[in-house]
Image (cartoon, rainbow, N blue to C red):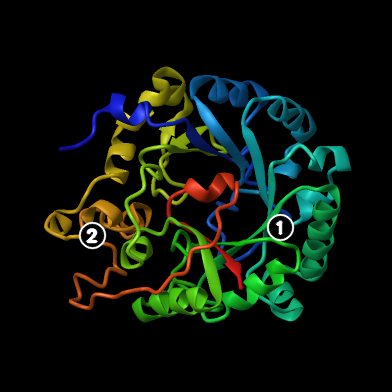
Amino acid sequence: MPETSDERIEQRPFALGLGLTNACNLSCSFCYRDPTHEDRLDLGQVQAVLGALPLRSVNLGTGENGMHPDFGRLLDWLARQPVKLTITSNGHTVAGLADEQVRRFHDVELSLDYSTEKEQDAQRGTGNWKLLHEQADRCVRLGVPVTFISVMMRSNFRRLAEVALVAKRFGAPLRVNVYQSVRTDLFALRYGEYWEGFERLFGACDAISIGEPLVRAMAGLPPRSGGCGRLTVRVTPRATVQPCVYWLGPGAPLATLLERGPAIVDSEPFREARGLPAACEACSFRETCGGGCAGRRQLQRKLGEPDPYCPIVRGEPRRLEVRMARGRDLPKTDSACTTIVIAR
């Protein structure tokens, strides 16, 4: 039986992904943001969003939030709220902050997809490797925890354990998101590459958290209560609301969230995000997997079908050998479809 909205709302507060702007100083070809025009939220909208939901954490993502012309004032207000505030950056925003501003974050995430300066700069831009290392060093000096974040894609899936070793130099974990084909399929993993990527990663790293549904199921872990469609809400710079950062379509207007509050989970996109494909009804992994990544299925316009990386529908059950690490206080731990590891 589907859970009721009351049961969902009472579980625990939401994790909010907040995109203050989609502006960025880089133009990475694998990025999901729309580079064709610039959008931004204002302080009044941000205040309204935080007033509409019970929250445990707020992550500033999408673009380089420091490029918002009113970022200083927005950060001042957000830092005074009773939530764990984090930011995801290519280093540019963090470099532009004063030390006291950096200290306002519970965790600073820095985007690193390769283990060598040459490869990172070729993909992100000259000087990015050096910038990331400078800002990671700075955060460590200031006592602010650092997490590195990588996109698992065709160009790096075999080498993410090497990236985790770079992160470990700063005492940092690595958070891994599987590439989603928002703008192009060029970087998308093939079925075998997806599984090889995770097998290699877990062969050299311990897992702090596994949110990628298929991976969690094949690792024999229990179901999660959070994630997309349940306790994760994304507010975009266009003032729209989505259950997943990759969700195809314009999203609901911000007014819908302000009107419904926690009951936003009863809106159609959120219901779709936690829906189970008919072909998965009889699967023994259905509670843990839930049909795989709903955002990926929806992007491929196959929301009613199993995840394309599912081994069960291919008759190829897998067993991932995973060694779990001691837990850390990372607000993104409960985000759907993300996996956090630490190099051994």
In front: 172, or 4? 172
* Residue ID at (73%, 55%): 25
Quadrant into which the N terminus falls: top left
Q: Position of residue 75 (x, y in %)?
A: 74, 32
Q: Position of residue 37 (x, y in %)?
A: 61, 46
When asked about the image quadrant of residue 21, the answer is top right
**Is 142 left, or right, of 302 in this rendering?**
right
- In the figure, 256 relative to 308: above or below? above
When asked about the image quadrant of residue 226, the answer is top left
Q: Which residue is mark 1?
A: 90
Could you tell me if residue 98 is visible in this image? no
Q: Position of residue 7 (x, y in %)?
A: 29, 28
Residue kind at label 2, given as amino acid type:
Phe
* Residue ID at (48%, 61%): 183
Q: Can you tell which of label 2 and label 1 is closer to the viewer?
A: 2
Residue kind at label 1, given as amino acid type:
Asn
Q: Which residue is mark 2?
A: 285
- In the figure, 299 relative to 102: above or below? below
When asked about the image quadrant of residue 48, the answer is top right
**Is 117 left, or right, of 284 in this rendering?**
right
Nearer the N terminus, badge 2 or badge 1? 1
Q: CA distance from mark 2 to mark 1?
A: 36 Å
Element assignment for label 1: loop
- In the figure, 300 relative to 188: above or below? above
* Residue ID at (82%, 68%): 130
* Residue ID at (29%, 75%): 318
In front: 30, or 276? 276
Quadrant into which the C terminus falls: bottom right
Q: Position of residue 185 (x, y in %)?
A: 43, 70
